[in-house]
Amino acid sequence: WEQHVEGAKLKSDGDSFRRKHDFDWLYQMRFHHDASQEDVLSHLTIAMANASFNYGFEYLGVADKLVQTPLTDRCYLTLTGALHLKMGGAPAGPAGTGKTETV
């Protein structure tokens, strides 16, 4: 995860993140904290592309064990878009490639 964040930071230092509506910025998973919200479940919002969800204190597993790759990023982007449209997704692939850990 740390390497992925470092890669995003390096990318942000370049020309790809010029405006907040650029796809390279929207493609990143972003966390927004707003303590002024009355409902505690609305304090933290997670956004990716056009979708945003309130973080509901769900268990996220052990993030350090999952290798973040461009394929993982595409999987997050696709599944987040599907959830935003009130749909679902079913990652497919060979055994041991991190499908369960990603979802």
Image (cartoon, rainbow, N blue to C red):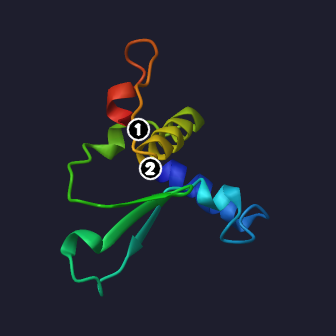
Q: Farthest residue in the right direction?
A: 15
Say if 58 sits above or below 52 in the image: above
Q: Mark 2 belongs to which amino acid?
A: His
Observer-nearest residue: 11 or 87? 87
- Does 43 sit left or right of 50 as displayed? left
Q: Which mark is residue 42?
A: none
Q: Mark 1 belongs to which amino acid?
A: Met
Q: Secondary structure at mark 1?
A: loop
Residue 99: x %, y % from top left: 39, 26
Query: Going 43% across and 25% down the picture, which residue do you hit?
Result: 91
Query: Going 34% across and 44% down the picture, which residue do you hit?
Result: 64
Residue 82: x %, y % from top left: 46, 41
Q: Secondary structure at mark 2?
A: helix
Number of numbered markers: 2
Q: Which mark is residue 84?
A: 2
- Does 55 sit left or right of 102 as displayed? left
- Does 26 sit left or right of 95 as displayed? right
Residue 80: x %, y % from top left: 46, 46
Quadrant (top left, top right, bottom left, bottom right) of the C terminus: top left
Say if 5 sits above or below 21 in the image: above
Say if 42 sits above or below 35 in the image: above
* Residue designated by label 1: 87
Spatial distance from mark 1 to mark 2, Cα to Cα? Answer: 7 Å
Observer-nearest residue: 82 or 18? 82
Crowding near pointer 1: few (<14 within 10 Å), some, many (20+)?
A: few
Q: Farthest residue in the front direction?
A: 86
Query: Going 52% across and 39% down the picture, which residue do you hit?
Result: 78
Q: Farthest residue in the top direction?
A: 94
Crowding near pointer 2: few (<14 within 10 Å), some, many (20+)?
A: some
Residue 36: x %, y % from top left: 30, 87
Query: Going 29% across and 75% down the picture, which residue do you hit?
Result: 43
